[in-house]
Amino acid sequence: MRKNQLGLCVLVLALVLSFSVAVFAQDVRITILNSKGEIQTQLEDIAAYYSSITDGVTVEVIAAAVGQSPFERAVALYASGNAPALLMLDAGDVLLFQDRALALNDEKWVADAIENSLSMATAEDGRILAFPVTVEGFGFIYNKAVVDKALGGEFDPKTINTYDSLRELLDAIEASGTASLVIGPEDWSLGAHFFSLAYSAQSPDFDEVNAFMDGLKAGTVSLAENAVVNGLLDTFDLMKEYNYDKLDPLASTYDRGTELIGTGEVGIWFQGNWTWPQIADFDTTGGQFGFLPVPIGNDPEALGNTQIPVGVTKYFIVDGEQNSPAQQRAAKDFLNWLVYDAEGQKRLVVDASVIPAFSNITIAPNDPLAVSLLEYVREGKTMNFVLNLPPDHWAQVGAYMQKYLADFSDRDAFFKEVEAYWQGL
């Protein structure tokens, strides 16, 4: 009798333990590191919705701190032993985590990724290390209602293809009684985006762009003697002349820029399509916004005068070091849901205003900046978005540009600082 009772107890205990293990195995929590602060709320909503429809899985989103690069945040999380299951990194940082990232070659979405979207996410041994999150581009954002009023008719953005035509447009806006332009002084905007035009406009051939940057490292390239770089600085000088905040050029903020362009207090703002969720909060025009290229000189045929940089700017790596196999599987399932589920696609493209990097997603974005960007893509009016810059480039070169913006340095001093930065890498 005792033997039978003991056997029954063992059986019951085994069933309880197996049930507990099964429940635990299904209770998976994953964390996402988000480095696109402008869609933090949207990502949190997506994570909450996905958690509500997926049994046993909870998805949480943490943000990279304002002013902190994704690389720095990711390194700190790994050092603390708290690496998220998914880490959103800048394109140029992906390969720096190749020893920690899970290979994703067998994932279904690999076959649907748009052309060249995986080139910066593929290691030399062929491992695909990351999921392309978003296609982005940048240039001069214009408020069409403001510009139409200034010109007294329908504005054709294709008419802005030289330095002189840009000046004429700024003059017309000012003459209409509206401030023409505001410069966002953030180091990431100036260093990673505006000055990156100095590299991308060197050539449509990315190998030649890389050769130019290699020349900067080797000290064989003189910025002062480069026509493209000087042309870009001429345009920046023009921007400084018309800057809404020229009396205190470092005082403005990203949030203030979204309000100024959204409400039509200024006509033009240099930024990218990632700004739409914030601009929309202030928009009174019904979404009348678009992009202009940043002219570099007076030759309308010169690279950069009719093109804007476009590329995949953000990638998700799946941690292969500190997360369990169950967490890794949950992270991969979440990515597949974004690509192949109708609700996942809608929340990514419509709610978060993300231009996806997958050919199977046919949902049209409903934000005007994405629509404008895609027009440049369809017309072949794009150029390389230089995304393989060193992790600290935006902070260092951005700081030099802030000094130049505030007239704390002149052009020669700025060029010397940038050259010294590259030679010190």
Image: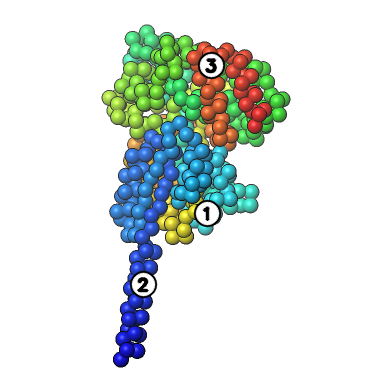
The disc at residue 321 is: 1
Q: Name the residue under label 2.
A: 17
Query: Amino acid under label 3?
Result: Tyr
- For label 3, count other residues whose C-alpha is less than 10 Å away and answer few (under 14), some (14-19) or many (20+): some
Residue 173 figure quarter: top left
Residue lying at the far bottom of the rendered structure = 1
Q: Which of marks 3 and 1 is nearer the N terminus?
A: 1
Residue 154 figure quarter: top left
Q: Earlier in the sequence, mark 3 or mark 2?
A: 2
Q: Which of marks 1 and 2 is in front?
A: 2
Query: Which element is circle 1 on?
Result: loop
Quarter holding the N terminus is: bottom left
Q: Is residue 180 left or right of residue 394?
A: left
Q: Which residue is drawn at 51% across and 47% down?
A: 78
Quarter holding the C terminus is: top right
Q: Name the residue under label 3.
A: 404
Marks 3,1: beta carbons within 8 A: no
Residue 297 figure quarter: top right
